[in-house]
Image (cartoon, rainbow, N blue to C red):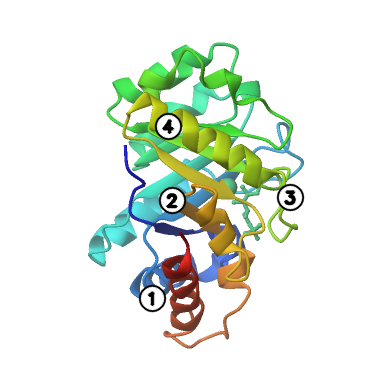
Amino acid sequence: MAKKENWIAPSILSADFAQLGTDVKDVLNAGADVVHFDVMDNHYVPNLTIGPLVCESLKNYMSRENLTAPIDVHLMVKPVDRVIPDFINAGADYVTFHPEASEHIDRSLGMIKDMGCKAGLVFNPATSLSYLDHVMDKIDMILIMSVNPGFGGQSFIPQALEKLKAARQLIDASGRDIRLEIDGGVKAENIREVAEAGCDTFVSGSGIFGNAKDGDANRYDTIIAQMREELAKAN
Ligand code: DX5
Ligand code: ZN
């Protein structure tokens, strides 16, 4: 399967939660493709963020505003099964989870797929891609963490590039329609080498929201245009 169209996926973890709707609208109108929605439970990761209520409100807001971008829910929650249906009912288009957070990975993936949602596995820096071995038929997204999960604003761990290349080979060998996503420390300065390692879906939190001036509806245009320019140079 040839590499897919590049998607830029702002992580709303770095948005202003007091004005989440307008932040999402502005970043999508500036050319972003996906809303990356980070769910943390203060158990699997040492931080606490947002749940299905926020997802549902955001989904409703987006449909009122005619914003059609997919919501990509990244679950950093253990155990994960209990909350999977909640997020799908709240409008998630993709649900990804960490294999360490499920006792029965195939069952969790099956739950997501059976509800008509796209499913993915997330790989921490030290987690082996071998979890994919027997479940590729249920995977729509492979998410490689380039930081240890839990916080925005951390530095990109360069070993993630080798892992992206390995995941790209697995995807190509499978011939399946699977997105390859990166998450953590992605900025305009390094997005090109991430793309060259085979990535097609780029999460960026502080790299997008951290670079913008408050109150200006066009504040994300420059940074997203810069990322696209870098992506266009990738080979
Ligand atoms: C980390 C989250 C990321 C994070 C990315 O656990 O999964 O999505 O918000 O933020 P930056 O781009 O700032 O590293
Ligand atoms: Zn994330």
Mark 3 against mark 1, which lies toward the viewer?
A: 3
Mark 1 lies on a secondary structure that is loop
Secondary structure beneath dot 3 equals loop
How far is the residue under mark 3 from the one under mark 1?
Answer: 28 Å
Callout in the foreground (1, 2)? 2
In the image, residue 178 sits, relative to residue 15, either above or below, namely: above
Q: Is residue 111 visible?
A: no
Q: Amino acid at mark 4?
A: Ile
* SS at badge 2: loop
Residue 157 is marked as: 3
Closer to the eye: label 4 or 3: 4
In the rendered image, the vertical position of residue 218 relative to residue 149, given as above or below: below
Q: Which quarter of the figure is the N terminus placed in?
A: top left
Q: Mark 2 = which residue?
A: 200
The three-letter code of the residue at mark 3 reads Ile
Mark 2 Cα shell of 10 Å, populated few (<14), some (14-19), many (≥20)? many
Write the residue at 35% across / 33% down. Answer: 118
- The reply to whether callout 2 and callout 4 are in contact (CB within 8 Å) is no
Q: Which residue is mark 1?
A: 30
> Separation of disc 1 and disc 2 at Cα?
19 Å
Report which residue position mark 4 lands on: 171
* Circle nearer the viewer, 4 or 1: 4
